[in-house]
Amino acid sequence: MNIKQYGLVLLFASGGLFANAANANELILNGGFEADGVEINSPFGWDVAENGALGSVVATSGNVSPISGYATAGAASGSFYGLLDSFTPSTQVLYQTFTVGAVSSATLSFDFFYNDQSASGLVFNDTGLDYTTAGTFDANQHWRFDLLKSGTSLFSINPTDIVTTYSFGNANTSNPYSNFTYNLSSDLATGGTYILRFATVGNQGALQLGVDNVSLLVTPVPEVDSYAMLLAGLGVMGFVMRRCNAVK
């Protein structure tokens, strides 16, 4: 290999380091709920937590809830979607735990719809995801999307357990789907282990929440050794080019 060829190899290698540093990684497993290919209460990559008499979480392909029998919007794309259905007074949580290193950028996006069969519409209570409303059964009917700290109770609404709440039951949307996109770059900047939570609570009537196309794309901060390799490569390339000019 002559000097010019060697310089080109180093140039392409350096460009590869830059490209690798800029690649975004998908952190959510089975965000489209297609992996199992069947209706299932424990979709691949996801976990479920439930409280109450009758309600459930399911990955389904139907346009009718298999839990309450109410019509839904079906899938936003593909065949399957995640469905949380508080049929009678109950609380449902669909969540996924992920670990990430320091990031330079992070974007969360998903499609969702809700159907509310209560007479009074979506209502909220300070007891959060407690369908008993601390034993009073005062009106408490809503959904929420949160980023939680690792190890947190899946039903917690304690501000010290929640990194950020991205939506809280009062968006101007319903059946069919709407798309939400959020910038999580500052929330995930230093990395760590987190829980992405979709939750419903209802004690005024049935409430369905559908989610699909869940994605969390992150661009990691390049590791120190990658920068070192890049700088070393550029240094060698500079030396080679100087030698090349000297022998002309």
Image (spheres, rainbow, N blue to C red):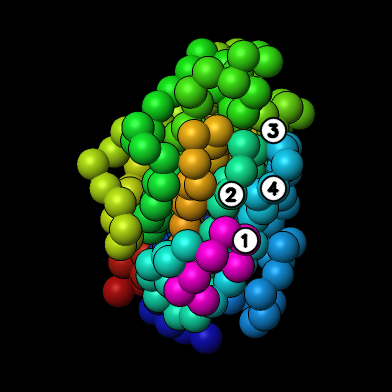
- In this rendered view, identify the residue nearer to me: 28 or 169: 169
| Place of residue 12 in the rendered image (x, y in percent of width and height, measured from the top left) | 42, 72
Q: Main secondary structure of the magenta part?
A: loop
- Asked if the residues shown at circle 3 and circle 2 are in contact, with their CB atoms under 8 angstroms apart, the answer is no
- Amino acid carrying mark 3 in the image: Leu
State which mark lies toward you, 3 or 2: 2
- Asked if the residues shown at circle 4 and circle 1 are in contact, with their CB atoms under 8 angstroms apart, the answer is yes
Query: Cα distance, mark 1 to mark 3?
Result: 22 Å
The residue labelled by disc 4 is 54
Q: Which mark is residue 154?
A: 3
Residue 49 higher or lower than 110, as above or below: above
Helix, strand or loop for disc 4: loop
Q: Which mark is residue 87?
A: 2
Q: Residue at x 50, y 26 (%)?
A: 140
- Amino acid carrying mark 1 in the image: Ile
- In this rendered view, identify the residue nearer to me: 83 or 69: 69
Helix, strand or loop for disc 1: loop
The magenta stretch spans which residues? 62-69
Query: Cα distance, mark 2 to mark 4?
Result: 6 Å
Specify whether residue 10 is in view: no
Q: Which of the two labelled residues, at mark 4 and mark 3, occupies the earlier sequence position?
A: 4
- Asked if the residues shown at circle 2 and circle 4 are in contact, with their CB atoms under 8 angstroms apart, the answer is yes
The residue labelled by disc 1 is 67
